[in-house]
Image (cartoon, rainbow, N blue to C red):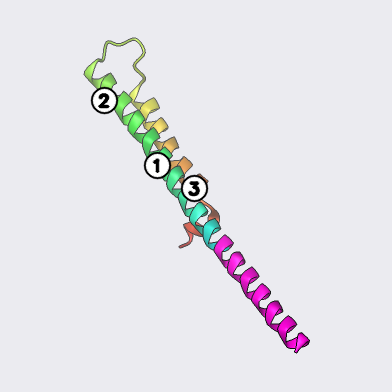
Amino acid sequence: MGEETESVANRLWRDRAQLREQERNEVQARLRIAEEKIAILMAENDRLASENARLRALSNPDAGSARSETELQMEALKGALMSLIARPADSLNS
């Protein structure tokens, strides 16, 4: 009877460990998704900031600090590329 009780306890312990490992893996997957979403949102924020600066420059062309259209386009492109770079390689293939 003692061995049977120990065997049941071992199975329960193993099942609990597997459940914790599965939960950890699910949390890690959710974290990766959240990190990807943050990178995308940051790139979008950069793009919008560049677009706002471009529109301000167009509405006030005499401003001394207005950047050229090319510089603004380069900054927008940089933001878009940064979101691609921030993604893990495996998410680009899916």
- At x 26%, y 25%, the residue is 55
Residue 69 located left or right of residue 58: right
Which disc, if any, is residue 55?
2
> Magenta stretch: dominant SS?
helix
| Residue stretch in magenta | 1-24
At label 2, the amino acid type is Leu
Inter-mark Cα distance, 2 to 1:
21 Å
Picture quadrant where residue 75 is located: top left
- At x 43%, y 37%, the residue is 79
Residue 21 on the magenta segment: yes
At label 1, the amino acid type is Leu
Which disc, if any, is residue 41?
1
At label 3, the amino acid type is Glu
* Residue 8 screen position, x and y as percent: 68, 82
Inter-mark Cα distance, 3 to 2:
30 Å
Residue that numbered label 3 is attached to: 35
